[in-house]
Image (cartoon, rainbow, N blue to C red):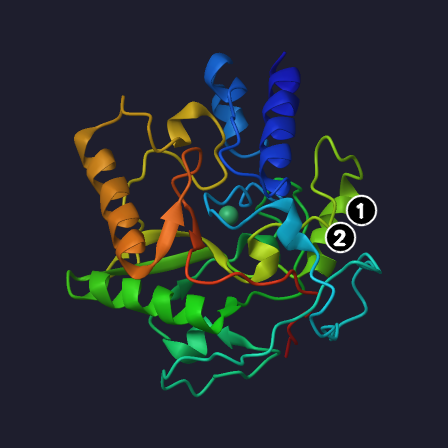
Amino acid sequence: MKKTYGLLVFSIMLNACGADRQASPVPAPESGPQPAAAARNPVLPSQDTLPPQPTTGDTEVVKPDRPKGKPVKPSAPTPKPAAAEKSETSKSAPAIPLTARAGENGFVDIQALDATIRLDIRYATANNFTSAKIYDCARCLLRLEAAAALQKAHRALKRQGLGLKMFDCYRPRPYQQRLWDKVPNPDYVTPPEKGSMHSRGAAVDLTIVDAQGNELDMGTPYDFFGREAHYDYTRLPGKVLANRRLLRRTMEAAGFQGIRTEWWHFSFKGKNYPLSDFVWECD
Ligand SMILES: [Zn+2]
């Protein structure tokens, strides 16, 4: 029973994410029981996807006129060939003083940009729904403009003695492929060629921490897919709701948009990016 529930939720979430569709309804989690065990499992290879972005449609996925991105690390399970991905060059880079600027295929390493932004990249550990390490190492890369927006949000929190902690940032398509290889079922995992906002380098999963690095109470752990994780679920302590509001307002003020079903996910609204195969180097 528990298993069935987990599978159901898992299926729903993955579909939602991967589809890169708008306003995707994610009804089921609300109706099922909320076993604590479900907190960790039924999760998210791509739950990150349903960006409430107006521009994000399936049509955006393939843009044949973009230059092809070069996969830096072919070691990962192969990405989809054709239609695919192209890494974006930082042509319209804004004037932000980044040492990491345009460093890696137009991506910016968040910690090179601001070392005070904390990382807890779950896919670089076994602490994720697959119980397997998906990323070769933990890094948080984002497209230039999204990185600048994230730093803006972090600075706003710093003025309040708080800061951001990242759970996931850019997710290279080869890594999405690894997830797919683990669960090669479109009902459960988004096909890599479809990708998610994370694979475009424009989405983040994150939370707020205090000056000591302790996470503020958001009511559920990251990767919890029961309705308690929904932003519009209000039967939670006032402090939790206030923390979620702070996160959402801060991110929105910086140019991101949240989604209803995951308090931790935000997509950058300022620009569209193609999916990318670029995989960062590990030391
Ligand atoms: Zn996400």
The local crowd at label 2, few if under 14, some if 14 to 19, many if 20 or more residues have their Cα within 10 Å, is: many
- Name the secondary structure under disc 2: helix
In the image, residue 261 sits, relative to residue 243, either above or below, namely above
The picture places residue 272, in percent across and down from the top left corner, at: 53, 61
Q: Based on the displayed image, in which of its 4 quarters is residue 281 positioned?
A: bottom right
The amino acid marked with disc number 1 is Asp
Q: Please indicate whether residue 162 sits to the left or right of residue 276 in the image.
A: left
Q: Are marks 2 and 1 in contact (CB under 8 Å)?
A: yes
Residue 71 numbered tag: none
The picture places residue 14, in percent across and down from the top left corner, at: 63, 35
Q: Residue at x 60, y 50 (%)?
A: 196
The picture places residue 263, in percent across and down from the top left corner, at: 38, 40
Between 249 and 269, the one nearer to me in the picture: 269
- Name the secondary structure under disc 1: helix
Q: Residue at x 33, y 71 (%)?
A: 116
In the image, residue 163 sits, relative to residue 89, either above or below, namely above
Q: Please indicate whether residue 246 sits to the left or right of residue 102 in the image.
A: left
What is the spatial separation of the Cα atoms under label 2 and label 1, in whole angstroms?
6 Å
Report which residue position mark 2 lands on.
177
Q: Please indicate whether residue 267 sits to the left or right of residue 88 in the image.
A: left
Q: Based on the displayed image, in which of its 4 quarters is residue 64 positioned?
A: bottom right
Between 261 and 61, the one nearer to me in the picture: 61
Residue most extreme to the left: 160
The picture places residue 74, in percent across and down from the top left corner, at: 81, 70
The amino acid marked with disc number 2 is Gln
Residue 281 visible somewhere in the drawing: yes
In the image, residue 282 sits, relative to residue 202, either above or below, namely below
Report which residue position mark 1 lands on.
181
